[in-house]
Amino acid sequence: MMETLSTGVGGAFADALLSKEWGYLESLLSGAIDFLGLTPGKQWEASTANGLIDTVFTQWFGPTDDIYEITDLATDRIADRHRVVYRFRVLNAEDDYVCEQTAYFDEIDGRIVTLRILCSGFLPVR
């Protein structure tokens, strides 16, 4: 059963990512990270925290994307692997969107060392 929390590394990761607090987000990631992501139509990879932020996350959430509401945030564990699921609203010049991401991660000493993210993509709110 999923537990809705905004605590722990998973909640902190989602909060930092969605508020685009890149410095704080980097502090939650291991300098060397094993990242794979999947968005509609594209696969993403990164091997460093800085590269992940600069070449992936700032592409997903650009300066004109206003993430104005987190509608759901839940964390869980599957054995030793962590999971965080977050749904949010994004407004930009094109439309008002909803998006959901599921992230699975491993952490060592409070820092994420392996991260996999599956993204629904930005879906227009009707």
Image (cartoon, rainbow, N blue to C red):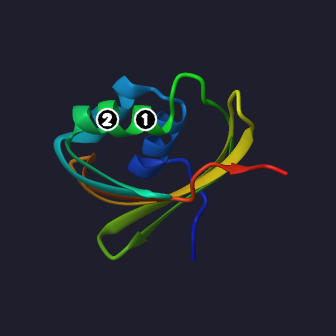
Q: Mark 2 belongs to which amino acid?
A: Thr
Residue lying farthest left? 32
Number of residue marks: 2
Residue 105 in the image: state x and y as whole percent. Answer: 33, 59
Vertical placement of residue 17 versus 114, above or below: above
Quick one: label 1, few (<14), some, or many (20+) residues within 10 Å?
few
Dot 1 falls on a residue whose secondary structure is helix
Which residue shows up at 36% across the image and 40% down it? 56
Residue 24 position, x and y percent, is 37, 28
Q: Give the structural element (helix, strand or loop) at label 2.
A: helix
Q: Closest to the observer: 24 or 50?
A: 50
Q: Which residue is mark 2?
A: 55
Viewer can see residue 71: no
Is there CB contact under 8 Å for labels 2 and 1? yes
State which quadrant residue 49 falls in.
Answer: top left
Residue found at x 59% / y 23%: 64
Instruction: For marks 2 and 1, give the CA distance.
Output: 6 Å
Q: Position of residue 73 (x, y in %)?
A: 60, 53
Whether residue 92 can be seen here: yes
**Residue 92 in the image, given as x and y percentages of width and height:** 68, 30
Q: Which residue does the numbered mark 1 point to in the structure image?
A: 59
Residue 24 horizontal side relative to residue 89, left or right: left
Residue in the picture at 54% in, 30% down: 19
Q: Identify residue type, mark 1.
A: Gln
Q: Is residue 117 left or right of residue 107?
A: right
Assess disc 2: are there few (<14), some (14-19) or many (≥20) residues with their C-alpha within 10 Å of its C-alpha: few
